[in-house]
Amino acid sequence: MRKILLTSLLAIGLASGGALVAQNAAAPAKPGAPDAARVTAGDYVVEPTHTQILFAYDHMGFTNNMGIIAMPTGTLSLDPKNPAAAKVSIEVPVANLRTGIPKLDEHLMSAQFFDSAKFPTATFVSTGVKVDGTSADITGNLTIKGITKPVTLDAQFYGAGKAPAQMGGKENVGFSATAVVKRSDFGLGMAVPIVGDEVELKITAAFMKP
């Protein structure tokens, strides 16, 4: 009886394992991959639900506070045969900024800081691209609160491919980027230097063909 029970359990285990292997073997591959050969030439638009700007700044020397800005819009013109000729233009709704602290968010939107009622949008427009493999320095003009300053983004190619059919089946390409800006350059210098002037930006940018 014991031998029969062990044999039955072993058979069940082997069957379950075989089913799991078959399931894993049938699992589809990721539609995107870090392969520049997958990038197709043309005009793209920002895929806003997967594009985010994270920012961090020193708070009185005690902590590195963070926040996020989501749902930007914009365009990208890209030719993989001539990536240095790429053009990117991004518009960021200032009111989409979130720190997780409602009262701070309200203060940042006020006339004392971003004055989002008067200046609802921040923009970045590229002026040049210097490519090194899958990395690039993207120079451009950043405009916040009506003030424009040159900024360089340290960008990295992340992946490209075609989205699944249920998600539209469109060509997608993604990048990550970092930059450091001084908020005082844009009329946002309240409480400097008690609160840090330099703001670190970490960007994840998704683009798709319209």
Image: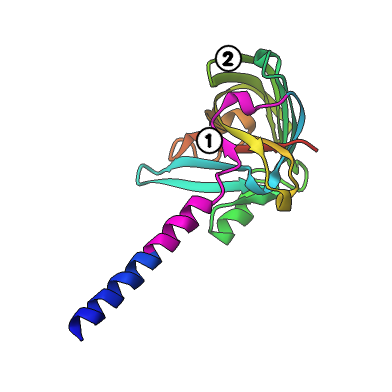
Residue 17 in view (yes/no)? yes
Q: Position of residue 4 (x, y in %)?
A: 24, 81
According to the picture, the residue beneath numbered tag 1 turns out to be: 201
Name the residue located 71 percent from the left edge and 26 percent from the top edge: 40
Query: As rendered, which of 71 and 174 lies closer to the eye?
Result: 174
Name the residue located 35 percent from the left edge and 46 percent from the top edge: 62
Query: As rendered, which of 133 and 189 lies closer to the eye?
Result: 133
- Residue 196 against residue 76 in the figure, above or below: below
Residue 110 in view (yes/no)? no
Splitting the image into 4 quarters, where does residue 29 fall? top right
Q: Position of residue 67 (x, y in %)?
A: 53, 48
Q: Position of residue 113 (x, y in %)?
A: 63, 44
Q: Position of residue 205 (x, y in %)?
A: 62, 37
Look at the image and say whether residue 38 sits in the magenta stretch: yes
Q: Judging from the image, what secondary structure is the residue with disc 2 in?
A: strand
According to the picture, the residue beneath numbered tag 2 turns out to be: 131
C-alpha distance separating marks 2 and 1: 20 Å
> For this view, does 146 lie left or right of residue 84?
right
Name the residue located 72 percent from the left edge and 53 percent from the top edge: 166
> For this view, does 37 lie left or right of residue 171?
left
- The magenta stretch is 17-40
Splitting the image into 4 quarters, where does residue 148 fall? top right
> For this view, does 209 lie left or right of residue 4?
right
Splitting the image into 4 quarters, where does residue 58 fall? top left
